[in-house]
Image (cartoon, grey):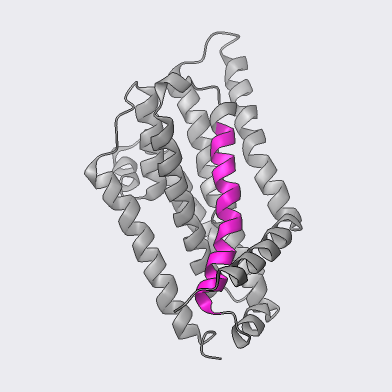
Amino acid sequence: MSLSISKIVVLTRFKFKELFRNKTFLITASMVPLLTLLMRFLYQNILDGEAMPPMMLALVLNLGLLMNLTSVSMMMPATMLAKDKEKSTLRTLMTSSVNGGEYFVSSVIPSFAVSVVINLLILFLCGIDMSQLNLGLYLFVTSLASLTSCVLGMLIGLFAKNQMASSNLCAVFILVLMLVPMFGNLADSFQNISGFLYTGIVGNMVSAFAEGSNQGLSIQSWLVLIVELLVISCLFVVNYRKSGFERE
């Protein structure tokens, strides 16, 4: 499948405009950094002005990351794809000169770009000591996780009949991808499951930073991140072809 850069650029611009016209997206994208900042001030108020321990700052950062990876990175691509299906925009594009690869890339880039910016923004808002973390590793791992969420969102949108159905399907994945890592520190059973979720890998990395370890991830963690991205991508490609959009 050949990809046309010019078509991808045009479609990406259109998707960016469509994304920023979406009120749900604007509210959600704004709420993530705001809630991160609110949680930081709330914990500071609880401590009555005392310095927040690193693990508590890591908890604030992890909460912001989980909200971003699920509510922005995953839900927005799912909603946009479901909207294109519902309004027959996708079918119209597929009957034109646009192929599936061009549509996929142009649909993922906007949500991915916004997600990466939010990942960086909440890092500065959470108040964590920057000397405690490996910034390059943070950006790479969170960006990889954001990309995985975007592709997962595209897969969910492919199965959803409409925008409402996509939101309902996303809610199920949010419960798993967000709650399991959050409760990972409270129960060993959750911790074991969290180690096999890309959102859990991100949470474990942030916790390691708070503990003073800014070394790289384990081989198992890297495998989880890469394999899950590849598996989800393959599932999308297979089901996209089965849907028949590309043949019509």
Residue 97 x, y percent position in the rendering: 60, 84
114 part of magenta stretch: yes
Residue 56 x, y percent position in the rendering: 47, 23
Residue 159 visible in the current orientation: no
Give the quadrant of the C terminus. Answer: bottom right
Quick one: 81 or 39, which is closer to the camera? 81
Side of 139 relative to 108 (left or right):
left
Quick one: 48 or 5, which is closer to the camera? 5
Side of 225 relative to 74 (left or right):
left
Residue 172 x, y percent position in the rendering: 50, 59
As displayed, is residue 1 above or below residue 118? below
As displayed, is residue 209 above or below residue 163? above
The residue sitting at 56% across, 58% down in the picture is 109
228 part of magenta stretch: no
The residue sitting at 41% across, 35% down in the picture is 136
The quadrant holding residue 87 is bottom right
The residue sitting at 59% across, 34% down in the picture is 121
Residue occupying the far bottom of the picture: 248
The residue sitting at 68% across, 58% down in the picture is 16
Residue 176 visible in the current orientation: yes
Number of numbered discs overlaid on the protein picture: 0
Residue occupying the far left of the picture: 219
Side of 165 relative to 24 (left or right):
left
State whether the magenta stretch is mostly helix, strand or loop. Answer: helix
Residue 140 x, y percent position in the rendering: 42, 42
As displayed, is residue 48 above or below residue 235? above
- The magenta segment is 99-122
Give the quadrant of the N terminus. Answer: bottom left
